[in-house]
Image (cartoon, rainbow, N blue to C red):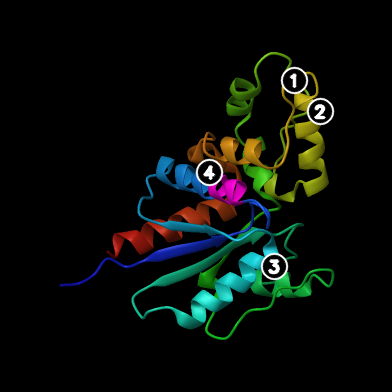
Amino acid sequence: MRRNRKVTVYVEGGGQDSDLLRSQCRQGFHKFAEAAGVRGVGFVSRGGRNEAHSAFCTALSEREMDSVVLLLVDSEEAIPEGLSNWEHLASRHDNELRRPEGASEENLFLMVQCMETWFIADVDCLKQRFGHGFKTTPFKEWPEFEAVPKATVFDVLDRATADCETSYAKGSTSFEILGLISPERVITKCPNAARLLDRLRKHMEQN
């Protein structure tokens, strides 16, 4: 009897010293994937991007033949034209992450330029989550969401929620929002998110 293929995604997020945040990170990604119709994928949080990369490399080297191991981290900035995802990560001299032996472009997915880019793709969700005091004026009709600088994304979230009972913050709030946003809205504005969900669906369809 053929076993179901195990698909595991090592994700950036959750911090290194908090089991609770790592659990909330995993739950957020699970909810986002399930809302997109992708079920059965395992998400693993080890903390920052270096920890996620290290855990991915170890899992890739030890994986069983019928399993799939993927890495999902922030791109931190726009991906220069002509560079592959792995080349982009290796080109970041302040925090380079290199492609391990046995990995291909099909093992690496990026949140461009950060997870919060997905959030600003669903303003209605943010408005409902933060409630009274939420401002929509900081949001623009960006022609390319993945070209919006990371600093701008965080500035928009800060200004939009400044007068709310709770303002935007990394951590538990961000992972809660991840589990609430609409994947349909995200993939229409973030091609790299669409690529991730498409690949996960194809892996699960092969089970």
Q: What residue is disc 4 on? A: 28
- Residue that mark 1 sits on: 135
Q: Earlier in the sequence, mark 3 or mark 2?
A: 3
Task: Pick out the residue farthest to the left.
Answer: 1
Q: Amino acid at mark 3?
A: Asn
Mark 2 residue element: helix
Q: Is residue 134 above or below residue 40?
A: above
Q: Choose the circle earlier in sequence order: 4 or 3.
A: 4
- Give the foreground label among 3 and 2: 3
Closer to the observer: label 4 or label 1? 4
Where residue 191 sits: x, y (%)?
58, 52
Q: CA distance from mark 3 to mark 2?
A: 30 Å
Which of pointers 1 and 3 lies earlier in the amino acid sequence? 3
| Residue depicted at 67% across the width and 36% down the height | 120
Residues in magenta, as a range? 19-25
Seen in the picture, residue 118 relative to 128 is either above or below; the reply is below
Q: CA distance from mark 1 to mark 3?
A: 35 Å
Name the kind of residue labelled 4 in the image.
Gly
Tell me whether circle 2 and circle 1 mark residues in contact (CB < 8 Å). Answer: yes
Q: Amino acid at mark 1?
A: Lys
Quadrant in the picture for the C terminus: bottom left
What is the quadrant of residue 198 in the picture?
A: bottom left
The quarter of the picture where the N terminus appears is bottom left
Residue denoted by label 3: 50
Real-space Cα distance between discs 2 and 4? 24 Å
Q: Earlier in the sequence, mark 2 or mark 4?
A: 4
